[in-house]
Image (tube, rainbow, N blue to C red):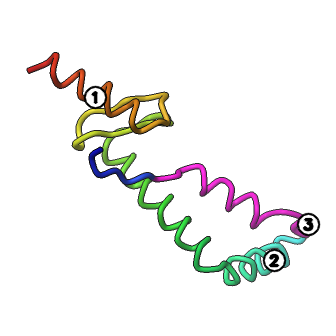
Amino acid sequence: MKHATVYRLDRIDELQKALSQQLPGDPEKAKQLALRRFQRMDAQLSHQLENATKGLVQALQYGINRYPAIVFDGHAVIYGITDIETAARLYDHWVEQNR
């Protein structure tokens, strides 16, 4: 198996939902509460957010327009599959066919 880096882009939406749960109607109070929640974020959650952000940057650089998507060698994209081994087999088959 080749080296793979997995980015969970949906983690940004999940975090956003968690930070905005049951916020007060007053915009200033809501802002302060969300900021306190963000500041209390633990190391694991912080790492997950960093991973998702890096993935979003990569997706923009590669021109990814939907997901799930798996990028190989920075130029080939397989959409709609989340299983890396299956995608790798498809990619390897494509490479062989296009030599």
Pair 1/3: label in front = 1
| Residue at image point 29% right, 52% down | 3
Amino acid type, callout 3: Gly
Picture coordinates of residue 31, whole percent (x, y)? 76, 75
Amino acid type, callout 1: Tyr
Amino acid type, callout 2: Glu
Q: CA distance from mark 1 to mark 2?
A: 50 Å
Q: Quadrant of residue 42?
A: bottom right
Q: Is 78 left, or right, of 21 in this rendering?
A: left
| Residue at image point 16% right, 16% down | 97
Q: Is 15 left, or right, of 60 in this rendering?
A: right
Q: Quadrant of residue 65?
A: top left
Picture coordinates of residue 55, whole percent (x, y)? 43, 54
Residue interval drawn in magenta = 7-24
Picture coordinates of residue 54, whole percent (x, y)? 42, 60
| Residue at image point 60% right, 55% down | 11
Mark identifier at residue 25 = 3
* The N terminus lies in quadrant: top left
Q: Quadrant of residue 14?
A: bottom right
Circle 1: element type: helix
**Mark found first going from the N terminus, 1 or 2:** 2
Q: Is 32 left, or right, of 95 in this rendering?
A: right
Mark identifier at residue 28 = 2
**Mark found first going from the N terminus, 1 or 3:** 3
- In this view, 95 is above or below 4: above
Asked if residue 18 lies in the magenta stretch, the reply is yes
- Circle 1 sits on which residue? 91
Mark identifier at residue 48 = none
Q: Crowdedness of circle 3 by 10 Å Cα count: few (<14), some, many (20+)?
A: few
| Residue at image point 23% right, 37% down | 75
Circle 2: element type: helix
* The C terminus lies in quadrant: top left
